Amino acid sequence: MASVNVENLSALSAKHPKPANTFTYGTAGFRMNADLLDSVIFRTGILAALRSKKLDGKVIGCMITASHNPAADNGVKLVDPMGEMLEGSWEAHATALSNAQSDEQLVDYIHSMVSSLKIDLTKPANVIIGRDTRPSGVALVNAFVDGLKVLDAKSTDYGILTTPQLHYITRCLNTAGTPEAYGEPSAEGYYKKLAAAFKTLVDGKTKLSPLTLDCANGVGAPKFQEFLPYLGDSLSVKIVNDDIDNPSKLNLNSGADYVKTGQRAPVGLKLTSQDRCASFDGDADRIVYYYQDEDNTFKLLDGDKIAGLAAMFIIDLVKAAGIDSIKVGVVQTAYANGASTQYLRNTLNVPVSCVPTGVKHLHHEALKYDVGVYFEANGHGTVVFSPSALKTIYSAEGSSPAQAVAIRSLRALSEVINQTVGDAFSDLLLVETILTQRQWSPKVWDQAYTDLPNRLVKVVVQDRSIFKTVDAERKLVEPAGLQDAIDAIVLKFRDGRSFVRPSGTEDVVRVYAEAATRSETDELAHRIGGLVFDFNSQGSGLRPREFI
Ligand code: NG1
Ligand code: ZN
C-alpha cells in the first residue's frame, strides 16, 4: 500500500500556503474569489489523484471555472469517469483536505483515506484538466498540477474548454474501446458527433431564421465559433457578447443568469419582435431562450420551458416510433415554475420528481426513468437515456416508413444530447431540432403554458449555515419558527408559493416567490426576504449585512 512521500509533499505544499479561511466543496465544487483558491486547488489535485487511484487509474476530470459568477471568482470541480459529478461521499474528503491546517494534518488525512477507502497508492492515476477563459485559470491549473505531483499522477491539460466538453472528453477516454464508447476524446470529436446528429434531425426540413446567441463574453463564444463550420448550413447563428479579451466583461450584464434572474435581455443584444435569442452562461453549461412579443414584452423561455418542450417532443416521438413502452419522466427542483409542473403533470401526463438544487441530484433522479428529462429553471439540464431504452431504440425496426423515421430521430436525439451533464451547445441543438421539426416560432413554443410571475431575491446574512432545509429544500427546519412565519405570509397570497434556502455557491440565502400576479409576487418576495433579514438579525443575534 505504500505511503505518501512526505518530503515531496512538503516541498510542493510550501508553494501553496493555506489562508485562514474555511472552505466547503459545495453544489458546484469550490467556488470563491480566485485569490483565495491556490491552496484549495493544490489540495483538490491531491484528491483527484487519490480518486483515480481508487478507481484503478480511470481518468478523472478537473474543470477550473466559476461559471456564471463574477470574473474575479474562480472555482474547481472534479468529474467522475463516466462524466458525472464527483461521487457525493468524496465531497467531504475534498472539504477536509482543503481545511487541513498543516502538512502533517494533510498527510494524516491522506493516510486515513488510503486506509479507510482501501486506496492502493502504487496504482497509476490519470487526470485531465480544462478551464474557462478567466485569466486566473492559468495559475490555478499549475497549482492543481502540483497537487497531482504529490502522488505522481499523470495529467493532460486540454486548455480552454466549456465545462460540458470536459465532461464529454472524460467519458470518451474512459469508454474508449468498450461497447459504451462515447466518441473521440477531443473538442473536435465532440463537434463532429453533435453536428452529425443534428444534421440527421433537421434533414429535409425548412431552415429556421437565424438565432441570436449571447455568449456572456465567455468560453462559449470561441468554442461555438469553432463549432459553426461543423454545422455548415444546417443552422444560422449570430454570436454576440463574444469579447473574451476583456476579462472583466465575463457574465457582466449578459449571460443566462443575468437574463433569467432579471427577466430581461442582455446588454449588447438588440431584441426585435419575434427574433429568437438565447444566452449561455460563462462556462456554457446553461442556456435560456427568449423573444419579444408584438407588444414589446420580454418573454423568457427558461429551463422549465425547455424541459416541457423536450418532454413533449420525446413522448410524441416514442409514440410515433411505436415503442411507447419507453417511459419518460421529468425531474425539477423547487425553483421550477408551478405552472410548468402543472403542465407536465396534467397536460403531458408525465411523472415529475422534485429534488434538491444541484445537477448531481437531478441527474441521479433522472437515471430512474427510461428517458429522464431534467432541467433547473436557470437552464442547466439535459436528457438521459437508460441503457435499456437505448437498446430498445437501437434494436427497433419499425413497421412503417413513419415509424422508421421516428426511430431514426430518436437515435440521433440520443447522440445530440450530452448524456454526461447539462450542456448549452447540445441543449441549443435539441431546442433548434424541435422548433425546426415543428416549424415553430418561440411564441408557439411559449404557448404550452403561462408562467406564474416569480421572483428570486438574495438576502446577505452573517452565517447562512444556520438555515437548514428538508423536503427537497421546500421547508426550513432551522432556524426554528421561521417556516411557520413564512407559511403564514404565503397563505395570504393567491397561488402563493415561497421557500428559503442557503445558496451552495454564494454567501447568501435565496428567497423564491411566485403568486398570481406580478405585484403580488414582488410583495411576497419582499415580505419573505424582509422576514429572513429580520429573523437573522434577531434570531442569531448577528447583524445582517444587506438585502438585495
Ligand atoms: P446555489 O447557489 O446553491 O443556489 C446555483 C443555482 C443552482 C446551480 C448552482 C451551480 C439557482 C437558484 N441556483 O446554486 O441551480 O446551477 O448554482 O451552478 O439558480
Ligand atoms: Zn455554468
Image (spheres, rainbow, N blue to C red):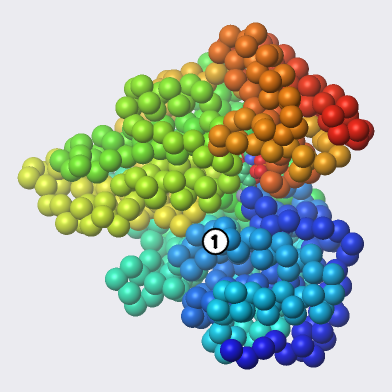
Residue 158 figure quarter: bottom right
Q: Residue at x 52, y 47 (%)?
A: 361
Return the x and y of residue 160 as percentages of the image width and height. 63, 65
370 over 140 or under it: above or below:
above
Say which residue appears at 64% left-offset and 87% top-offset. 152
- On the image, the x and y values in percent for residue 319 come to 20, 36
Ligand 1, image quadrant it occupies:
top right
Residue in front for this viewpoint, 109 or 155: 109
**Res 325 seen here:** yes
Q: Nearer the viewer, residue 479 or 200?
A: 479
The residue sitting at 36% across, 33% down in the picture is 351
Q: Is residue 164 left or right of residue 321?
A: right
Where, quadrant-wise, is the N terminus in this rendering?
Answer: bottom right
Using the rendered view, name the quadrant where residue 260 is placed. top right
Q: Position of residue 76 (x, y in %)?
A: 68, 61
Relative to residue 71, is residue 289 drawn left or right? left
Q: Can you name the residue that lies furthest to the left here?
A: 399
Q: Give the number of callouts.
A: 1
User: Which quadrant, please, contains the C terminus?
Assistant: top right
The kind of residue on which mark 1 rests is: Glu
Residue at the image point whose x is 84% and y is 29% from the top: 539
Residue 217, image x, y percentages: 68, 49
Instruction: Say left or right for 448 vs 9.
Output: left
The crowd level at tag 1 (other Cα within 10 Å; few <14, some 14-19, many 20+) is few
Q: Camera-side residue: 506 or 443? A: 506
Relative to 9, is 162 above or below? above
Q: Nearer the viewer, residue 351 or 487?
A: 487
Q: Which residue is mark 1?
A: 87
